[in-house]
């Protein structure tokens, strides 16, 4: 993942970050480990639901 530094300090503020499914790239090396929970096929796209080691659930969209 690529992170952009905030211009102000948010040390005591909870934030929500939105990452679009098509911005998540599945790779075998160089990223956080995840377990594939589900895979759905929609025509030329596939949605893959992933669970990270900390329990966070993500959905990745990729072309088939």
Image (cartoon, rainbow, N blue to C red):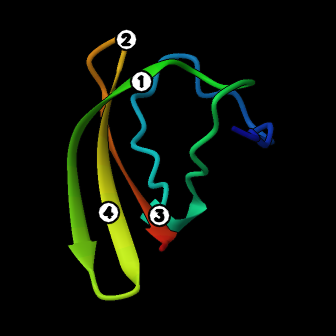
**With 51 as the anchor, is 26 left or right in this view?**
right
| Residue at screen point 39% across, 43% down | 16
The residue labelled by disc 2 is 53
Left/right of residue 31 with respect to residue 5 in the rendered view: left
Q: Dot 4 corresponds to which residue?
A: 47
Label 1 sits on residue: 34
Could you give the CA–CA distance between mark 3 and mark 1, rounded to whole angstroms? 17 Å
| Residue that extends furthest to the front in the rendered view of this protein | 64
Q: Which mark is residue 23?
A: none
Is disc 2 in contact with disc 1, using a CB cutoff of under 8 Å?
yes
Residue nearest the observer in this picture, 42 or 9: 42
Check if mark 4's residue and mark 3's residue have beta carbons within 8 Å: no
- Residue positioned 39% across, 78% down in the render: 45
Element type at mark 1: strand
- Closer to us: mark 2 or mark 4? 4
Against 3, is 53 above or below? above
The Cα–Cα distance between marks 4 and 1, rounded to whole angstroms, is 15 Å
The residue tagged 3 is 20
């Amino acid at each position: 993942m690529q992170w952009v530094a905030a211009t102000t300090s948010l040390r005591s503020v909870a934030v929500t970050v939105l990452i679009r499914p098509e911005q998540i790239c599945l790779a075998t090396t160089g990223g956080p480990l995840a377990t594939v929970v589900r895979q759905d096929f929609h025509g030329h796209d596939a949605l893959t639901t992933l669970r990270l080691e900390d329990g966070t659930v993500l959905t990745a969209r990729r072309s088939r």
